[in-house]
Amino acid sequence: METVQEIIQRLSQAGLKVTPQRVAVMQALFKLHHPRADEIFREVSQNLPGLSPTTVYNVLDVLVNKEIIRKVKTEADVMRYDAMADHHHHMYCTQSDRMEDYVDPELDQLLSDYFRKKDIKGFKLKEIKLQIMGEFEKPLQKS
Amino acid sequence: METVQEIIQRLSQAGLKVTPQRVAVMQALFKLHHPRADEIFREVSQNLPGLSPTTVYNVLDVLVNKEIIRKVKTEADVMRYDAMADHHHHMYCTQSDRMEDYVDPELDQLLSDYFRKKDIKGFKLKEIKLQIMGEFEKPLQKS
DNA sequence: TTATTATCTTTGTATAATTCTAATTTAAAA
DNA sequence: TTTTAAATTAGAATTATACAAAGATAATAA
């Protein structure tokens, strides 16, 4: 969970103006779990009445371009957003659009070793992300 | 490249009626490379004038549900579809929307061994798919 | 601190992808 | 064949997202 200070710092570092809208969108991204744009809009609107949906899309686009956050598409065809603190993978439920983070440095090491040897011709590899498909056994708890 | 015979057989096996629209959509899926719904629509319309876009969406949904084809989840806003002959991964260009298949049984073995040991709690794993992000060195040839 | 300016946000409209509904047609079983 | 459940269609509706122009504001430098 990031503090406002850290959010402000991240925005500045990226050469972005620090606006209340941007800070609030980032906060929503940390608070909500892989939210959709409309969820962010609703959340942020509570603190910033009069917020425009366009602003949310603009802010999200800017953050994606600066690689501060990421877009992720789920099974259900909705776009979700992810504050990408550290490198991580995603577990997807094949029955719903539920999605969770999966962090596993050991696996990352294994993969990075493997691909160092492998070296795909004509392709400069930058990152490996896993989509781990399956079913969650326990239903998601309401927060 | 699948023959019409094989496509018909696959549809029947899944308990689906064999309609010209379905066969044509499957053919388009093999001909085109990870097409979007609208690309399929345009392709199939050439042979089946008067085709409705709704039909393309319906057919794609049915095929996805019967696990004959797959939706490909990317960071792009549009959904792409994949005739899933064999298990494979995807390589993505970070500079464009280019996307290629990546087949690597050795890697699959490695991953399956790893996750057999690992066993994520509360999650029934079905499949691992890699998103290999990077840059293609040579531009794609026009077909 | 204040003025300046580039950047951001907003409003309102537009567009594109996808879904819905209800009517019509068709593949396949009897 | 006839029947019927399943599939397709047209057209309207919805939804998410993008656009363009005007107004507001954060950051820079005077």
Image (cartoon, coloured by chain):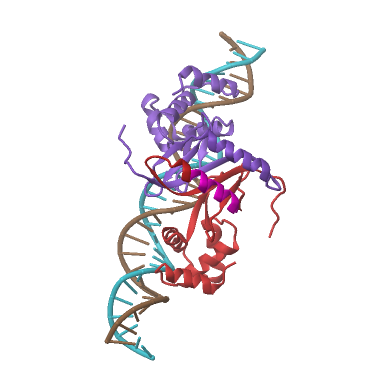
Chain colours: A red, B purple, C cyan, D brown
Q: Answer with the quarter of the image where residue D6 lies.
A: top right
Magenta residues (range): A103-115
Relative height, residue A61 to residue B12 (above, below) = below
Please state the horizontal and vertical placement of residue C26, each as a whole percent of the image: 50, 20
Please state the horizontal and vertical placement of residue A16, each as a whole percent of the image: 41, 69
Residue placed at 45% from the left, 72% from the top? A19
Relative height, residue A106 to residue A62 (above, below) = above
Whether residue A115 sits left or right of residue D18 in the image: it is right
Relative height, residue A71 to residue B107 (above, below) = below
A111 in the magenta segment: yes
Quadrant for the N terminus of chain B in the image: top left
Residue placed at 40% from the left, 28% from the top? B31
Of A111 and A135, the residue lying toward us: A111
Question: Please, which residue is most extreme toward the front here?
Answer: A117
Total numbered labels placed on residues in the image: 0
Whether residue B17 sits left or right of residue A10 in the image: it is right
A102 in the magenta segment: no
Do we see residue A95 in this rendering? Answer: no
Please state the horizontal and vertical placement of residue D8, each as a whole percent of the image: 48, 27
Of B103 and A85, the residue lying toward us: B103
Do we see residue A108 in this rendering? Answer: yes
Predominant secondary structure, magenta span: helix
Quadrant for the C terminus of chain B in the image: top left
Of C15 and A143, the residue lying toward us: A143
Q: Answer with the quarter of the image where residue B42 lies.
A: top left
Please state the horizontal and vertical placement of residue A131, each as a whole percent of the image: 56, 45
